[in-house]
Amino acid sequence: MLEGTLTYPAGHPCCSVLIAGPHPFLGGDMGNNVVSALSKALALRGAVTLRFNYGGVGASEGGPADWPKVMSKFWKDGTFDEEQDWVNDVGSALAGLRRWCDLSPVVLGYSFGCWTAVKNLRESNAKAIVLISPNPKQHEFEPLCQSQAPLLVIHSDNDFTCAAPEMMSWFESLREPKTRIQLSAGEHFFRGHELDVTATVLGFLQHHRLLGAEQHDNGH
């Protein structure tokens, strides 16, 4: 069982959005500043959003059987086999979102969540894809070519995980249709820059006619 929060508009939803958050070993949970800001902002524009905790985080069941062992491997190699379980968690969250809101989703990933979201693209039938602070040096994003949904990549000009020139080079290799937005001085975590991130995402989805008018009442 996974712990999650469904945030929804007061009226009829115009779209659904799954938000896959950062790595659990790097403060990744559904209370993350970027994840929370996006969830609330999207609901105010008519979207049903689902954010969740990966297995073993918060009240979510599962997770690695030996946390110290996999954490040691993570800090040594940057990855470990059990991360695939968190990829599977995104698939489960997508299935739940489709049951609760029968709309093809927007798939949104932040940091590590970019990879876990993209690994589930084949099954998602995504209407749009949003990747915030992806790290193509750490993860492969080949599944992006399996979808022709509009793609938005947001990154900072001073992200320590992937320098701006490397990000731009990787972005150039991706298929169309695609949009890249570089924000200033947000580093990787966008602390204090959450409004810039949400405004960028809202503008992209509005451009593709996936959002409604701003609302002033939403529930959980």
Image (cartoon, grey):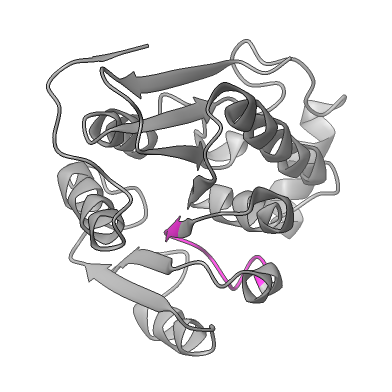
Q: Is residue 130 above or below residue 138?
A: above
Residue 15 location, quadrant? top left
The reply, left or right, for residue 35 in relation to residue 58 is left
Q: Is residue 218 above or below residue 87?
A: above
The reply, left or right, for residue 132 in relation to residue 64 is left
Does the magenta-highlighted stretch encompass residue 180?
Answer: no
Percent x, y for residue 214? 13, 35
Q: What span is colored magenta in the figure?
A: 130-141
Q: Residue at x 21, y 29 (%)?
A: 44
The reply, left or right, for residue 186 in relation to residue 220 is left
Q: Nearer the viewer, residue 220 or 111?
A: 220
Q: Quadrant of the N terminus?
A: top right
Q: Is residue 196 above or below residue 22?
A: below
Percent x, y for residue 115? 62, 56
Percent x, y for residue 119? 71, 56
The reply, left or right, for residue 198 in relation to residue 111 is left
Residue 49 location, quadrant? top left
Total labels drawn: 0
Q: Nearer the viewer, residue 60 or 77?
A: 60
Q: Residue at x 38, y 21 (%)?
A: 7
Q: Quadrant of the C terminus?
A: top left
Does the magenta-highlighted stretch encompass residue 136?
Answer: yes
Q: Nearer the viewer, residue 125 or 109?
A: 125
Q: Residue at x 61, y 32 (%)?
A: 98
